[in-house]
Amino acid sequence: MTYSKHFPDDCPPSQCDIASGEFYRFIKNAHEKPQPKDFLSWRQEFPDKECPTGLSECQACGVSIHSSLDDAKNLSLRIPKLKKMKVTKGFLKDELGRIKHTPSKNEKSHHTWWITEESEPWNFFEIIVVKKEDSTKT
């Protein structure tokens, strides 16, 4: 597999898995189909910035995906930035790269996905309608 030349050495890390399975990704724009710009890594979007605290350079070269739709729904209710985004669903397969489970306190199903240079991940994802629960219920 070939990855972008901007990836640091040993990235993706050796202790990650082959991309496989159903995953969810937030995208910024509401188009009919996901676009290439929806799959840019943090590093591609901000090539001259330092990585945010707690994010390695290697992780900054990957994109965020979630293995749980419920997790994605809950995040979209709690995080203002994500409320404005759409959720996509895709089925990953080995030629699309490598993944690593990188959970956080608020994102238990979070994975980092390092996409191979020659793949077109936007062709493997579709926008889904996510019914957002009423957050005012007690």
Image: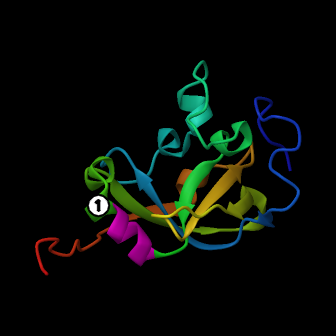
Residue 65 vs residue 9: left or right? Answer: left
From the image, give the main secondary structure of the stretch colored magenta. Answer: helix
Residue 35, relative to residue 51: is it above or below? Answer: below
Q: Total marks drawn?
A: 1
Residue 2, relative to residue 93: is it above or below? Answer: above
Displayed quadrant of residue 136: bottom left
Q: Where is residue 101 in the image (x, y as percent from the top left)?
A: 67, 66
Assign the C terminus to one quadrant of the image: bottom left
Instruction: Name the residue tied to disc 1.
Output: 78
Displayed quadrant of residue 3: top right
What amino acid does circle 1 point to?
Arg
Residue at 34% across, 70% down: 73
Residue at 24% across, 74% down: 131
Q: Position of residue 56 (x, y in %)?
A: 69, 41
Residue at 43% across, 72% down: 71
Choose between 49 and 98: the one closer to the eye. 49
* Secondary structure of the residue carrying numbered label 1: helix
Q: Position of residue 119 (x, y in %)?
A: 69, 49
Residue at 59% across, 64% down: 103
Sort mark 1 into few (<14), some (14-19) or many (20+) by Cα contacts within 10 Å. Answer: few
